Image: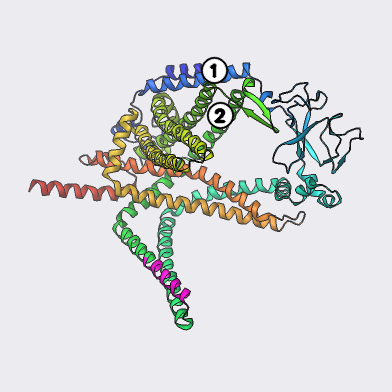
């Protein structure tokens, strides 16, 4: 980490993304290149103090983790312990006010739960995990009970050793379900009737098909991106008219239902039917009112909707021209997974405080000191801040590449040299402090909400429901504040990606631009968000339908819960689609803010118009309005 920080300090100041087009016939003019470089290249570091603070914080976090690794033992947290507190594989005990039932389990390394239906972990340490359904009696050589302590027979079931514990072998249990009736055991009957046993067996059997379906979902997602490139306008207008049709149909349906109920009341003279008719009448009035309001909003915002469609078209072209953008969320997703894995291991080591462990009723009980709770809270805050940092770095990387594409002084963007990599290096060298600053604000709110959530749960346990509801309301308000800050951060990162500058200045300038164009921004967010939701649902639904067909028509294995497996595919594909379309969402906002910046700066300098051709007509319209306004002021 120290070497990374030193590398950040020593990297040369100007090494990223200049126009590179070997075809000299298509080279932009020197003046255009100069304007382009003044926006994309000429900048300096800002918020360096926050960047240093972040690196110091990360070093302290990993330092605490390393100390925990050297001083604590993972076995304290994960070692298999039976219901009496005997450690499996060790002559060690951890009992709470008990002296009986101590047993030397040195030769018994695995923990077997002989009654999974019990509310407490009824378990015994065993030499090997049982591999069949049966009864283990006290006279058997492999009796799972403790000699001198146990005399009762115990039911066994097929199990596999995992982390020192015997977990049910779902594939064997599914095969041997018929044996359940032949054994007088509630444990085996529990497995025989268990939904989880059957479902896990089907999940294990169909894992290859699940993987294939997720790959299909990825392909369908890429096809959706290509469709947006080819017919973004058509899909956007189709989405808008589909929503209008849905509102109109809802109005028609409620009206028809109201009239049908009135006719039924005239025939039956039933009081309940009359009440239903009156209720449906009010539902119709509300639905009709909402429909009229929505249609009026669409009519009022139609010109802005056309701008939103143009922005989406430009965004589709930008993403198609820079396909490496699709790798940005994937790379940062992998980084997130790696960090979460490391964080989880460090957290386990921090929790493995042997002096805080007691054992009772088959469960571990932890009694941490105030200092230990403080360290764990610091650990949670590290998770929030570092994950927010990675998310912000992903956003500013995407925004920088799209902004470079937008302002490149030629309609032919092939002259750009590695815009995605160049954007990442600019963000790494110049904007890490701003990224850390914005991430810190969100992380602080997340930590406060996390603490309030703990307080709420404690109040509920103490039956103080009123106080718990108050805390829940405060938490809800903070969630709204968090969403607002994330929205401001997002636009600040875009502005910083264009011009550089400090985080505070980026927030101020971005908010001023959004507030000055609030109707445009709201319309674009509505249209783009709805289009992305439709895309996610479309991708997931198509893939889930394919999965359902594959599982339902399988001739080699009968899937009883094929519809649930299809649901798993839907959820997994939705996550993949969200990952892919997150780039599109960030790119839409970047293109829009670039257009606002371009329009605000070029009002008096028509030669600096850099907008793509799809947006130039909207700029010219603003230009005419601006000239008309100036003329009226002069008169």
* Local secondary structure at mark 2: helix
Above or below: residue 163 compared with residue 314: above
Is residue 277 found inside the magenta-colored segment of the image?
yes
Give the crowd class for mark 1: few <14, some 14-19, many >=20 residues within 10 Å.
few
Q: For this view, does 606 lie left or right of residue 213? A: left
Q: Mark number for residue 339? A: 2
Above or below: residue 613 compared with residue 446: below
- Upstream in the sequence, badge 2 or badge 1? 1
Residue for point 46% across, 81% down: 269
Circle 1 residue = 63
Q: Position of residue 274 (x, y in %)?
A: 44, 75
Q: Quadrant of residue 435?
A: top left
Residue at the farthest left position: 635
Q: Nearer the viewer, residue 632 or 112?
A: 112
* Local secondary structure at mark 1: helix
Residue for point 61% across, 47% down: 214
Q: For this view, does 75 lie left or right of residue 402? A: right
The secondary structure that most of the magenta stretch takes on is helix
Q: Quadrant of residue 337?
A: top right
Q: Is residue 328 visible?
A: no
Q: Position of residue 266 (x, y in %)?
A: 44, 82
Report the span colored magenta: 269-285
Q: Position of residue 91 (x, y in %)?
A: 78, 21
């Amino acid at each position: 980490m120290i070497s990374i920080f030193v590398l950040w300090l020593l990297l040369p100041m100007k090494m990223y993304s200049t126009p590179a087009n070997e075809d000299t016939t298509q080279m932009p003019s020197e003046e255009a290149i100069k304007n382009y470089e003044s926006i994309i290249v000429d900048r300096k570091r800002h918020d360096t103090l926050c960047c240093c603070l972040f690196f110091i914080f990360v070093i302290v976090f990993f330092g605490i983790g390393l100390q925990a690794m050297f001083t604590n033992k993972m076995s304290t947290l994960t070692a298999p312990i039976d219901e009496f507190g005997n450690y499996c594989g060790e002559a060690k005990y951890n009992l709470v006010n008990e002296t009986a039932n101590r047993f030397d389990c040195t030769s018994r390394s695995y923990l077997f739960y002989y009654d999974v239906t019990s509310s407490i972990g009824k378990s015994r340490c065993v030499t090997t995990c049982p591999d069949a359904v049966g009864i283990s009696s006290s006279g058997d050589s492999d009796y799972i009970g403790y000699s001198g302590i146990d005399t009762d027979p115990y039911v066994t079931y097929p199990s596999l050793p995992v982390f020192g514990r015997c977990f049910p072998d779902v594939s064997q249990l599914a095969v041997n379900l018929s044996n359940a009736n032949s054994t007088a055991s509630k444990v085996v009957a529990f497995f025989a009737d268990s939904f989880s046993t059957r479902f896990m067996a089907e999940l294990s059997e169909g894992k290859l098909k699940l993987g294939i379906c997720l790959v299909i979902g990825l392909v369908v997602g890429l096809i959706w991106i290509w469709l947006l490139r080819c017919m973004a306008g058509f899909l956007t207008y189709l989405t808008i008219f589909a929503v209008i049709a849905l509102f109109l149909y809802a109005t028609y349906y409620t009206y028809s239902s109201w009239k049908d109920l009135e006719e039924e009341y005239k025939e039956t003279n039933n009081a309940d039917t009359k009440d239903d008719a009156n209720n449906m009448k009010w539902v119709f009035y509300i639905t009709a009112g909402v429909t009229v309001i929505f249609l009026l909003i669409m009519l009022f915002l139609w010109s802005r909707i056309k701008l939103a469609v143009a922005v989406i078209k430009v965004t589709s072209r930008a993403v198609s021209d820079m396909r490496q953008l699709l790798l940005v969320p994937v790379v940062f997703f992998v980084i997130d997974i790696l960090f979460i894995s490391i964080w989880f291991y460090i957290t386990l080591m921090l929790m493995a405080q042997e002096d805080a462990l007691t054992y009772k009723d088959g469960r571990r009980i932890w009694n941490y000191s105030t200092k230990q709770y403080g360290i764990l809270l610091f650990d949670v805050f590290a998770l929030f801040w570092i994950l927010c940092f990675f998310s912000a770095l992903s956003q500013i990387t995407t925004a920088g590449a799209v902004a470079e594409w937008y302002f490149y002084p030629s309609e032919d963007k092939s002259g750009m040299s590695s815009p995605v990599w160049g954007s990442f290096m600019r963000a790494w060298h110049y904007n890490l402090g701003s990224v850390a600053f914005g991430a810190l604000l969100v992380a602080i709110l997340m930590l406060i909400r996390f603490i309030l959530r703990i307080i709420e749960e404690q109040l509920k346990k103490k039956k103080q429901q009123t106080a718990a509801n108050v805390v829940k309301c405060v938490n809800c308000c903070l969630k709204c504040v968090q969403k607002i800050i994330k929205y401001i951060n997002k636009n600040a990162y875009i502005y910083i990606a264009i011009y550089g500058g400090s985080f505070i200045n980026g927030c101020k300038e971005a908010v001023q631009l959004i507030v000055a164009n609030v109707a445009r921004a709201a319309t674009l967010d509505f249209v783009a968000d709805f289009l992305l939701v439709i895309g996610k649902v479309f991708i997931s639904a198509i893939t889930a339908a394919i999965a359902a067909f594959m599982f339902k028509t399988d001739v080699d294995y009968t899937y009883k819960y094929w519809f649930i497996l299809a649901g798993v595919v839907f959820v997994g594909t939705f996550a993949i689609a969200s990952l892919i379309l997150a780039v599109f969402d960030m790119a839409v906002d970047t293109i829009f803010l670039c257009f606002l910046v371009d329009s605000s700066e070029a009002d008096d300098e028509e030669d600096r118009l850099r907008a793509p051709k799809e947006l130039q007509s909207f700029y010219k319209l603003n230009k005419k309005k601006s000239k008309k306004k100036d003329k009226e002021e002069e008169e």
